[in-house]
């Protein structure tokens, strides 16, 4: 399993270093969104000449966004250039971003303002554990690292027996990709895997200053080629109600849940309470 504890913590970063990381994160994101588009998708004439790189050219994005090619190139290269909201919105439209992708782009743009992401919460208070315990169906609390901080017995029964695992093995993303028992229980695993990675990408970009995230991704990419492939897509999605299908070993019954994620208090914005709600008529 990939270790999720004991990884290096973010050292103190100067404002110059932090701004440089944020600019690079924004540039990488723009490049990934450009690479997936073809000229005909954005109304440009199709060319039959072989392109040296996949997707649109930087110059084509610049034309669509109404900015100079040099300016857009600087943005993709991670240079620290001033960007207005009007310009970033125009670039978002040119890249035909989905609502979630557009929101993510604005978050990266706002990241050029002073301030840092909140610290990661590594433990919760007992009252929250008691609340989770009272729920009849699977429920758990994770942080932005996807580390499991609290869960009830239904999680052990239907998802994976996390209680019997040591803390470093209690990460939802790594378990999803590296634990064969968890994978076998999820009938729509491919859909859940893709959505989970897209959500985790938003956290990764949010904590651009924290070396834990690239180290975790590097470790998991080496352990799971499927994770590595999904990670290279650079997809981002917001948390939303997601349907999952579970089947326990040696049982014919399929348990269907809608996963609902609730944000925590302002004191711990990195925490998320996930509640599994059985689809009507499909209670275990």
Image (tube, rainbow, N blue to C red):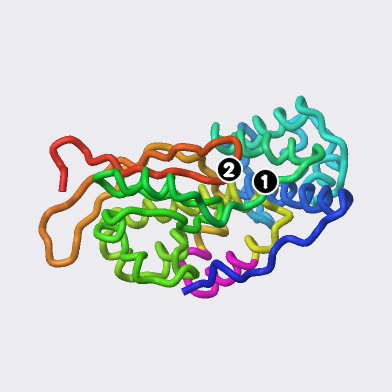
Question: Which residue does the image show at 47% across and 40% down from the upper left?
Answer: 239
Q: Position of residue 78 (x, y in %)?
A: 81, 50
Question: Which residue does the image show at 51% across and 72% down from the upper left?
Answer: 2
User: 148 or 127, which lies in front?
Assistant: 127
| 95, above or below 211, in the image | above
Q: What secondary structure is marked by label 2? A: loop
Q: Residue 118 carries which label?
A: 1
Q: Quadrant of residue 41?
A: top right
User: 208 or 32, which lies in front?
Assistant: 208
What residue is pinned by disc 2? 268
Neighbours of disc 1 within 10 Å: few (<14), some (14-19), many (20+) = few
User: 116 or 51, which lies in front?
Assistant: 116
Direction from residue 193 to residue 61 in the image, left or right: right
Q: Position of residue 169 (x, y in %)?
A: 45, 69
Tell which residue pokes out farthest to the front in this image: 126
Question: Which residue does the image show at 55% across and 58% down from the upper left?
Answer: 231
Q: Residue 154 carries which label?
A: none
| 172, above or below 41, in the image | below
Question: Which residue does the image show at 53% across and 69% down from the upper left?
Answer: 220
Q: Is the magenta stretch mostly helix, strand or loop?
A: helix
Q: Where is residue 16 in the image (x, y as percent from the top left)?
A: 89, 51
Mark 1 and mark 2 in contact (Cβ < 8 Å)? yes
Direction from residue 129 to residue 284 in the image, left or right: left
Alpha carbons under labels 2 and 1: distance apart:
8 Å
Q: What secondary structure is marked by label 1? A: loop
**224 within the magenta span:** yes
User: 255 or 62, which lies in front?
Assistant: 255
Q: Which of marks 2 and 1 is nearer the N terminus?
A: 1
Direction from residue 187 to residue 104 in the image, left or right: right
Tell me the mark number nearer the camera, choosing from 2 and 1: 2
Span shown in magenta: 215-228
């Amino acid at each position: 399993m990939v270790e999720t504890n004991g990884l290096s913590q973010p050292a103190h970063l100067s404002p110059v270093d932090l701004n440089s990381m944020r600019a690079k994160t924004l540039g990488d994101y723009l490049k990934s969104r450009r690479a997936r588009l073809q000229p005909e998708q954005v109304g440009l004439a199709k060319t039959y000449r072989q392109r040296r790189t996949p997707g649109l050219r930087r110059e084509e994005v610049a034309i669509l966004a109404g900015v100079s090619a040099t300016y857009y190139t600087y943005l993709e290269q991670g240079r620290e250039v001033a960007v207005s909201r009007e310009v970033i919105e125009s670039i978002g439209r040119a890249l035909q971003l989905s609502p979630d992708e557009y929101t993510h782009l604005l978050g990266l743009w706002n990241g050029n303002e002073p301030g840092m992401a909140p610290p990661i919460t590594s433990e919760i208070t007992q009252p929250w554990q008691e609340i989770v315990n009272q729920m009849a169906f699977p429920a758990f609390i994770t942080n932005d690292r996807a580390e499991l901080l609290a869960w009830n017995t239904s999680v052990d029964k239907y998802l994976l027996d996390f209680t019997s695992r040591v803390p470093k093995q209690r990460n939802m993303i790594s378990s999803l990709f590296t634990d064969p028992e968890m994978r076998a229980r999820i009938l729509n695993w491919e859909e859940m895997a893709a959505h989970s990675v897209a959500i985790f990408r938003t956290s990764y970009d949010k904590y651009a200053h924290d070396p834990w995230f690239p180290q975790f991704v590097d470790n998991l990419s080496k352990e799971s080629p499927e994770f590595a492939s999904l990670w290279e897509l650079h997809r981002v999605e917001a948390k939303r109600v997601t349907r999952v299908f579970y089947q326990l070993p040696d049982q014919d019954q399929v348990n269907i849940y809608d996963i609902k994620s609730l944000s925590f208090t302002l004191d711990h914005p990195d925490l998320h309470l996930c509640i599994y709600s059985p689809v009507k008529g499909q209670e275990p």
